[in-house]
Image (cartoon, rainbow, N blue to C red):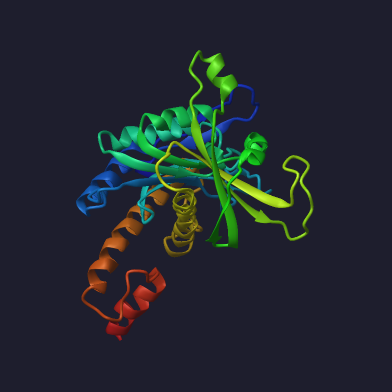
């Protein structure tokens, strides 16, 4: 694994003083893509890419302090159709998800090449003019969470609200069309584009009135270029990216991400990539065997699979 490691890269933001460390691995990227092709992951008509970062707390010799006030790494991960790991890029703990995200996504879509991607989903770290402008050239539709301090001025403009159920209970959803990023577009000599803002709100427990919105609701919003689906469908589709957290839980607890063997960022990326590939293969393997054995289900985690399929027959 050490021999497969590639050099660690460093960079700085335009106005920042922090040195960011990250690393990719071109050989394992291509290997993973070829494996995904071989097991048929790219066969579905609709392909959805999700991007998120996760913190892996550790005390390696080169790990940096994260925003959670503990040392660790903060790799960026892309999944394909919620169940397969498409791309892994290791970042040090002091590199927030927002920094250099366009460069990361450029590497992802360069890796995909001519493979058509229908949808892209991400959280509020992707709410950046350069990221959204880039995604418009690569995917049919994107669905990105928004930071409230950027778009809360639009909330009072929503006039029609519909009720729907969310994982946190009943909420209300509404939609408007907005023209964000006016300053950034003007600075680059570009036309300000129109996007759709899908807003969801929930009544606060303490009923405290907000100074900006002048009501007692908690607001969240999603920006998208999808003007065709109804609001509930847009909100529901973006909510499905919560499966990223389940993938991180599986990778950390079933495939060893919480127990990286090396002391440096680039060598540990090799380990993260191999175990991500094992995760992809495991999905195919358990799906295959669960069709032939009633005591297996495709949703079984690694521990239950080992116990029922390996330990018991061995005994």
Residue 117: x percent and y percent?
32, 40
Residue 63: x percent and y percent?
58, 44
Residue 151: x percent and y percent?
63, 36
Image quarter where the C terminus lies is bottom left
Q: Quadrant of residue 221?
A: top right
- Along the viewing direction, whichever of 18 and 238 lies nearer the viewer: 238
- Along the viewing direction, whichever of 160 and 63 lies nearer the viewer: 160
Whether residue 278 can be seen here: yes
Q: Does residue 94 appear left or right of residue 206 in this picture?
A: left
- Along the viewing direction, whichever of 3 and 63 lies nearer the viewer: 63
- The answer to whether residue 220 is above or below residue 12 is below
Residue 22: x percent and y percent?
49, 36
Q: Does residue 1 appear left or right of residue 91 in this picture?
A: left
Q: Quadrant of residue 17?
A: top right
Looking at the image, which residue sits at the far bottom? 315
Residue at (42, 46) in percent of width and height? 50
- Along the viewing direction, whichever of 232 and 58 lies nearer the viewer: 232
Q: Does residue 166 appear left or right of residue 240 in this picture?
A: right
Looking at the image, which residue sits at the far top? 189
Whether residue 97 can be seen here: no
Q: Does residue 279 appear left or right of residue 172 in this picture?
A: left
- The answer to whether residue 95 is above or below residue 236 is above
């Amino acid at each position: 694994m050490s021999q497969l490691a590639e050099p660690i890269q460093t960079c700085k933001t335009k106005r920042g003083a922090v040195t960011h460390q990250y690393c990719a691995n071109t050989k394992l990227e291509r290997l993973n893509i070829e494996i995904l092709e071989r097991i048929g992951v790219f066969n579905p008509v609709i392909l959805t890419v999700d991007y998120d970062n996760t913190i892996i707390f550790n005390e390696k010799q080169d790990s940096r302090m994260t925003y959670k006030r503990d040392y660790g790494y903060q790799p960026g991960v892309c999944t394909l159709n919620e169940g397969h790991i498409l791309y892994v890029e290791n970042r040090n703990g002091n590199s927030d998800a927002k920094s250099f995200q366009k460069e990361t996504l450029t590497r992802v879509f360069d890796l995909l090449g001519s493979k058509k991607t229908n949808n892209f989903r991400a959280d509020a770290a992707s709410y950046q003019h350069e990221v959204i402008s880039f995604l418009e050239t690569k995917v049919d539709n994107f669905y990105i969470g928004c930071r409230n301090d950027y778009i809360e001025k639009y909330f009072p403009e929503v006039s029609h609200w519909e009720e729907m159920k969310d994982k946190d209970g009943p909420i209300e959803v509404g939609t408007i069309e907005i023209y964000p990023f006016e300053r950034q577009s003007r600075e680059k000599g570009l036309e300000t584009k129109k996007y759709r803002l899908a807003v969801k709100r929930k009544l606060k427990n303490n009923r405290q009135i907000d100074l900006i919105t002048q009501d007692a609701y908690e607001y969240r919003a999603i920006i998208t270029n999808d003007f065709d689906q109804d609001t509930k469908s847009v909100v529901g589709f973006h909510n499905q990216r919560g499966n990223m957290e389940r993938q991180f839980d599986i990778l950390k607890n079933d495939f060893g991400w919480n127990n990286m063997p090396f002391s440096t960022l680039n060598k540990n990326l090799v380990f993260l990539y191999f175990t991500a590939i094992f995760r992809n293969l495991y999905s195919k393997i358990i799906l295959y065997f669960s069709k032939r054995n009633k005591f297996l289900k495709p949703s079984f985690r690694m521990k239950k699979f080992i116990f029922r399929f390996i330990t018991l027959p061995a005994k």
